[in-house]
Image (spheres, coloured by chain):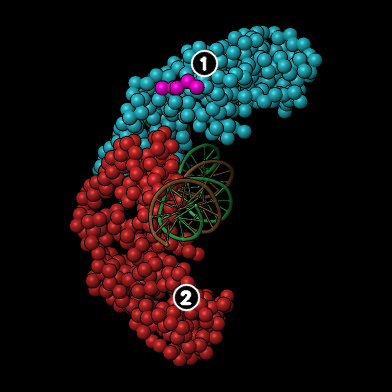
Chain colours: A cyan, B red, C brown, D green
Amino acid sequence: MSLTRYRYFALVADHGSVREAADALRVAPSAISRQIASLEEEYGTPLFERRARGMRLTTAGTAVLETARTILDSVQSARAAIDELQGMKRGHVRVWTVEGAMDDFVYPALAEFSAAHPSVSFDIMVASSDQLVQRLLDDEADIVVAFNPIQHRSVLSLAEIADALVVAAHPDDAVAARQSVRIAEIGEMRLALPDRTFGLRRLVDDMVAAAGIALKPALVTNSIQSLRSFARAGLGLSILTRCATRRDVVEGRLVAVPLQGRNLRKACLKICVRNGRTLSPAARALARHLARSARSYAAGHV
Amino acid sequence: MSLTRYRYFALVADHGSVREAADALRVAPSAISRQIASLEEEYGTPLFERRARGMRLTTAGTAVLETARTILDSVQSARAAIDELQGMKRGHVRVWTVEGAMDDFVYPALAEFSAAHPSVSFDIMVASSDQLVQRLLDDEADIVVAFNPIQHRSVLSLAEIADALVVAAHPDDAVAARQSVRIAEIGEMRLALPDRTFGLRRLVDDMVAAAGIALKPALVTNSIQSLRSFARAGLGLSILTRCATRRDVVEGRLVAVPLQGRNLRKACLKICVRNGRTLSPAARALARHLARSARSYAAGHV
DNA sequence: GCGAGTGTTGCCGGATCGGCAACGAACTCT
DNA sequence: AGAGTTCGTTGCCGATCCGGCAACACTCGC
């Protein structure tokens, strides 16, 4: 939203330091410093006293802080009023998702939504893609985030994220230095794979079948986390999606090498709802939000 | 400021139409339309009902309008509180300016300042540059905006705007089609000039003297407005500054052709205060604001 | 004096904003 | 009914703003 300056300002006032506020907001200190400076220019007077150990409000700053709180509260209360109008007060939404999308996509999007609609509560349940579709058909899930779900006329996809298959390797593994890995090669590798109820596994099976190879996985599991751990421990390679490996890659614990091959079907994360079913207002709003997040996620990580 | 969306929103709600709000704010309707759309996305619901004859608030919109008013009021009240702290309540500032800078520079800057500090009142007096300096020394002016004022150790320049000399011509005049005019040529032209108390006139006189030419002005006046009218009526050419002709140029009534010549001294508009004198808080704030405006004006019109 | 902690600044890539012109929709007046 | 008017919206583009990064300046405590 556009009230960034006031949010930054209030947070700095609370923490007494640009640095701490920056950590709390997960932005660079310079961004906050600039917004404070621009606010001071707008009011034509310093709002903080700069000290060696942080920032202390000036008298003028105190007045602005009061304003900042008023502003932020009143936006919050407008949201609450709208929630009430739309029957989202005390709403509850049941989201089922594949494990691989949870950390990198579902939770960040959920955090945004929850900040806007604090009174809505959630179930976040994890299952394999096949099971997800079943939950949706059984009306046990309002929204599912599935990986290459089977086509079904009662399942409506609102948005999708193309998510490449990668080979996850320990940074010291020989594979980690490569630009890509061909399908034909993975038959020879020490591999960990998800079990056959996973959309990811179906994709891999189809590809290796088309290439005429047989896989001898060193480990089969029903947990994405365990696939990551396998590779992180240097026990061998795992096949995962880029999205599921992002955090470990950024933090240097894994390297993700793209899989290459002519039979590489589009690997696709989809936000799905049950066709024809009328969702609760809260669920509808969250579904819209997830779909929007998916589109911007897709745009940002191509 | 960054609360644009809420200002736009409130104004549209008040006027009941994007177009009227756009006219009132002097921005394009599309800009407002977008901000409204983004606000609606932020709240996840339409805030206006689109009708053939304008926009009508929805119920959700009414809730947001309340918020918008709270926000805008509370910013206003923070300003007022700061003004009070700084002793700017009911301040009064006496500004003296050259006529040529009034419309294009002084009034826009003043409007911004006045929006931020509504309780400050002004004298805006017009005089020639020589007289301005005298007012400042006599403590009859707090701030002056002068054109190439004479150097004086008690006159402190806070900021300056380089302002090129131009020949103003009627659009049909032969000169209007040219890229530039050399000093040497203006001796032959039918010219209007300000009288000798104007900084602008001093500049012209110095240049023609250096070029060894004598001028036979067709009209001498103590009013910039009359110089403009002279050229607009097609009676001949006027020597003016780019800043003083901008509006007429934009609206197609005049063409401004740059003057060229090696003796062309920098033509310069300066924001000046009396050195050593302690200004009232309101005057100090306005001086700062004018100086800042001058810098951004200079940056924007090179 | 030096290191650790702080806030700020220059630079740059990406996102946003506003102006312009063209469009589509709905009403009004022949 | 049809032409014209009055709306709001959208695509495009240039200018501006914002945030990340790295280097810097400053203060305090050892």
Q: Residue at x 70, y 19 (%)?
A: A173
Which quadrant of the figure has residue B282?
Answer: bottom left
Q: Which residues are magenta?
A: A276-280
- In terms of depth relative to the viewer, which is nearer, B236 or A90? A90
Please state which amino acid type lies under the numbered disc 2.
Answer: Leu
Query: Which residue position is annotated with label 1?
Result: A136
Placement of B38 over or under B28, stated as above or below: above
A211 vs B91, left or right, is right
Disc assigned to residue B287: none
Q: Which one is in front, B134 or A203?
A: A203
Label 2 Cα neighbours within 10 Å, binned few <14 / some 14-19 / many ≥20: many
- Is B114 a magenta residue? no
Q: Numbered disc 1: what chain?
A: A
What residue sits 34% from the left and 32% below the top? Answer: A82
Choose mark 1 or mark 2, whichever is in front. 1
Which percent across, then down, holds residue A24?
Answer: 41, 29
In the image as oriented, which residue stretches furthest toward the left? B90
Q: Quote the CA–CA distance across marks 1 and 2.
A: 70 Å
Position above or below: B10 against B118: above
Mark 2 sits on what residue? B254
Could you tell me residue A260's position as x and y percent? 73, 25
Residue drawn at (50%, 22%), measured in percent from left and top? A276
Pick whichever, D19 or B50, lies toward us. B50
Q: Main secondary structure of the magenta part?
A: loop
Asked if B58 appears above or below D11 in the picture, the reply is: above
Residue A259 placement, left or right of B181 = right
Q: Is residue A102 visible?
A: no
Residue D27 x/y as whole percent: 36, 40
Numbered disc 1: secondary structure: helix
Estimate how packed mark 1 is, as few (under 14), some (14 to 19) or many (20 or more) residues with alpha carbons within 10 Å: many
Residue at 52% from the left image edge and 14% from the top image edge: A137
Spot occupied by residue A302 in the image (x, y as percentages of width and height)? 62, 33
